Amino acid sequence: MTSAGRFAPSPSGELHVGNLRTAILAWLFARSTGREFLLRVEDLDRARAGSEAGQLRDLQAVGVTWDGDVVRQTARGPLYARAIAMLEQEGLTYECFCTRREIQEAASAPHAPQGAYPGTCRNLERAELEFKRSTRPAALRLRADAAEFTVHDVLHGEFTGVVDDLVLRRNDGVTAYNLAVVVDDAAQGIDQVVRGDDLLPSTPRQAYLASLLNIPVPEYAHVPLVVNRDGARLAKRDGAVTLADLASAGVDAARVRDTILDSLGLPAGPLANALASFDPRSLPMEPWMWPGMPGTGA
Ligand code: GLU
């Protein structure tokens, strides 16, 4: 089995400089440790026609290349079904009929653990279960027996976060992201996960799920996000932040790449030039703002 890192974009639109910075970092982490680098399109949800091709083009334009074929989650249903069946056989799942609103209401009760599913459907009586089955389709949840789990992150050290009865399969039949990501990383031989630090809080859930599936937990590195001038995670509505927008403003892909490398304290030029000086321990850990953001004076 290979040892690999990866980038796993959701094809929900164009990539922006924040996504490109994370992709460059993931590439540097993998290549500087002799790993393969894989690309997985997370198209179970939020896929928009045409956006995958544009994303792959933009990644290549800033020098992010990958090994082998692109993997798409929509082609991997049987793999997810096998993992879910294994959990079902071990009695580690249950059907959940809650609506989003019911969950929000229950989760905002005074003693509910923050962000955790309150367990409403965990122990339904037979008759209640039958009745609920006749009212709406069920999602499938994990019957977790831990309330928190600790992971090790190369950049954040030990991180302990909430584990709850997370959704494995949504009530529309689509595999949930937390299950798919764990199964895919393992099946693809990915032992290094580099992604935005907005996903750090979900990581203990994923690592816990991996442990239940007898899957080795990968090495994690959650990298700082690119933010807008309000300090919020960058979004496309924040201005000229995609390669296409920037190209119309006269900023080509090589300059975007070099600006990102500069923000990481790395030399300009093809990404391979930065490998020798890339050291995760000296990465800036603060959120970064694209210098051309309106209002920054740049
Ligand atoms: N597909 C997710 C995203 O684009 C990334 C998930 C991951 O890297 O684990 O936000």
Image: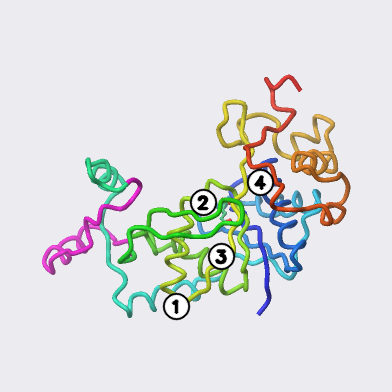
Quick check: is the Cβ at mark 4 less than 8 Å away from ligand 1? yes
Q: Position of residue 132 (x, y in %)?
A: 19, 60
Question: In the rendered image, which residue does mark 1 sit on?
Answer: 82
In which quadrant is the N terminus drawn?
bottom right
Question: In the rendered image, which residue does mark 3 sit on?
Answer: 73
Disc 2, disc 3: CB below 8 Å? no
Query: Looking at the image, is 279 positioned above or below residue 133?
Result: above
The label nearer to you, 1 versus 4, is 4
The label nearer to you, 2 versus 1, is 2
Query: Looking at the image, is 210 positioned above or below residue 262?
Result: below
Q: Position of residue 137 (x, y in %)?
A: 29, 61
Question: In the rendered image, which residue does mark 4 sit on?
Answer: 19
- Residue type at mark 2 is Leu
Label 3 – label 1 distance at C-alpha: 14 Å
- Residue type at mark 4 is Asn
Asked which secondary structure carries label 1, the reply is helix
Which circle marks residue 200 in the picture?
A: 2
Residue plotted at (67% across, 49% down): 22
- Residue type at mark 1 is Arg
